[in-house]
Amino acid sequence: MYDISIQEITKVNWEEAVKLSVHENQKSFVPNMVESLAYAFIKPWDEALDPYVLVENNKIIGAFYISYTPDSEDNYWIGGFQIAKEYQGQGYGKQSLNQIIDFIEKKHPECKIVSLTVEVENVNAIRLYESVGFVNQHRKNSDQQAIYKLIVG
């Protein structure tokens, strides 16, 4: 079990955050950190989009954002979830994802459903999401990504 914390991306840590990268063959699956920060500024999908980093031993090991409609029960989306390439394959992904779900439940107690999308060819991510309880909705978004949902609370 790792000691992973979730921290907002701020003016103090953003430069380290943008250095985060995944393996070359995964780059088409997730936005890079500059794109994620742009999404946080522009909020293209919902009223709110909050970017976070995953930190262990004072090192950024991953990142994600939550796109949501405040006070809704079913419009909370995990996006941009990634573990830095040097930390992959060591259990960080599953533990981080479980912590993200707990974090959403604590920060947004009204939330009943957490959703995410995944590229259909990203079998490792699909396996990870299903292992923590996300269920394929057998629907796709406009980018042809599969939609997964998890009932919480």
Image (cartoon, helix red, strand yellow):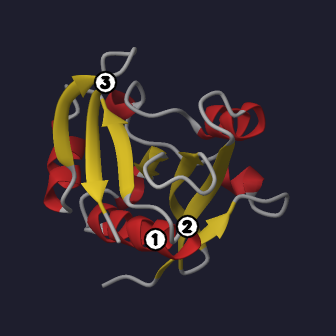
Q: Which residue is mark 3?
A: 145
- Above or below 151: residue 33: above
Give the spatial CA distance, label 1 vs label 3: 25 Å
**Residue 113's quadrant in the figure?**
bottom left
- Nearer the camera: disc 2 or disc 3: 2
Which mark is on residue 105? 1
Q: Secondary structure at mark 3?
A: loop
- Nearer the camera: disc 1 or disc 3: 1
Q: Are marks 1 and 3 in contact (CB under 8 Å)?
A: no
Residue 153 screen position, x and y as percent: 35, 72
Residue 51 screen position, x and y as percent: 64, 52
Please indicate whether residue 145 sits to the left or right of residue 139 in the image: right
Q: Are marks 2 and 1 in contact (CB under 8 Å)?
A: yes
**Residue 47's quadrant in the figure?**
top right
Amino acid bearing label 3: Gln
Q: Nearer the viewer, residue 101 or 96?
A: 101
**Quadrant in which the N terminus appears:** bottom left
Q: Secondary structure at mark 2?
A: loop
Give the spatial CA distance, label 2 vs label 3: 25 Å
Q: Tell me the residue at 28%/33% (across/down).
A: 147
Residue 101 screen position, x and y as percent: 39, 66
Comes first in the chain, label 1 or label 3: 1
Q: Secondary structure at mark 1?
A: helix
Q: Which residue is mark 2?
A: 108
Q: Tell me the residue at 55%/71% (across/down).
A: 55
Please indicate whether residue 136 sits to the left or right of residue 119 in the image: left
Q: Nearer the viewer, residue 102 or 119?
A: 102
